[in-house]
Image (cartoon, rainbow, N blue to C red):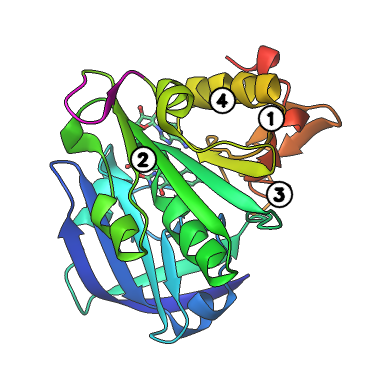
Amino acid sequence: MDRETTVVLDNKALNNDHRMLVVEAPRLSNMARPGQFAELSTNGATLLRKPISISMADREKGTLAFVFRMIGKGTEYLGTLEPSSKLDIIGPLGNGFDTDCGSALLVGGGVGTPPLLYLAKQLKTEGKKVSVVLGARDKGDLLLLDEFEKLGIEPVCATDNGSAGVKGTVVTALEEKAPLDGGTKLFACGPWPMLKALSAFSESKGLELEVLLEAYMGCGMGVCVGCVVPTTEGMKRVCKEGPAFNAKEILWSKIR
Ligand SMILES: Cc1cc2nc3c(=O)[nH]c(=O)nc-3n(C[C@H](O)[C@H](O)[C@H](O)COP(=O)(O)OP(=O)(O)OC[C@H]3O[C@@H](n4cnc5c(N)ncnc54)[C@H](O)[C@@H]3O)c2cc1C
Ligand code: FES
């Protein structure tokens, strides 16, 4: 973990309420692993920094990318940052994904999609076969399709209203369209109900599943114990022992 005063290179709208922020961060980009997150300063717009997943790290260019949904004061502030403005970042935080697998199937729901982009790039670099399934309410909410295509991956999509891809959830898409065999490991990030459904699905198919969890966070560094989740080994901190967990560890019945 380190702290760096980064410089904003780009901050572009992806749709009505999602943006991609790219910063020059030579030190942090060198340390970041897929699945880790960072605490972004809001320069006083909010009491606490904002935890955002690392969507991409480019070690050669020394850059980090974050994709966020503008949902409140903190993310709205991030949305206003102009190129060449400064942004104080602490990171990378958390454990990150375990990429040890044969082939990988990445499942993203809504704003859970961004961290899977960096994971896809890493898995490809390691020579693994990678497939992606993305879900959203509507076609316009599907994120980063073009970025996955740049990596040579054409995502299978699912939308609640059927405006793109399969009509239904990511589980519907997995059952109908996704290439699954015994050696495939699933990686997922998205809303809790989606992760819960995927956990049941992977268990019924005998597949390994690693989930990236989000929780309300205070410090983001393991001190306040504000982000704990129930696991088979007691309460664990999402910001420190996670955010990536083996789905079998999580006591899904005790969540929400
Ligand atoms: C490890 C981690 C990684 C994250 N990665 C991303 C990311 O890549 N992109 C992204 O857009 N968001 C991400 N988030 C969520 C993001 O941190 C929150 O949306 C953000 O803090 C909202 O701040 P705000 O000040 O804009 O809104 P606030 O005013 O704080 O909140 C606005 C609304 O969002 C809800 N909310 C706030 N935080 C969360 C949360 N953690 N989970 C669910 N609902 C929440 C509040 O209840 C409220 O309804 C991540 C969160 C964690 C813990
Ligand atoms: S947010 Fe403080 S311990 Fe996780």
The residue shown at (70%, 23%) is: 203
Q: Quadrant of the C terminus?
A: top right
Q: Which three-letter amino acid code belongs to the residue tagged 3?
A: Val
Q: Is residue 152 above or below residue 212?
A: below
Separation of marks 3 and 2 at Cα, in angstroms = 26 Å
Give the labeled residue for mark 4: 198
Task: Give the residue type that dot 2 points to.
Answer: Val
Residue corresponding to mark 1: 229
**Secondary structure mostly seen in the magenta stretch:** loop
N-terminal-most mark, 3 or 2? 2
- Disc 1 from disc 4: Cα separation: 18 Å
Q: Position of residue 85 (x, y in %)?
A: 23, 75
Above/below status of 83 relative to 45: below
User: Which quadrant of the render holds ligand 1?
Assistant: top left
SS class of the residue under badge 2? helix
Residue at screen point 53% across, 66% down: 122
Q: Residues within 10 Å of mark 4 (few under 14, many from 20)?
A: many
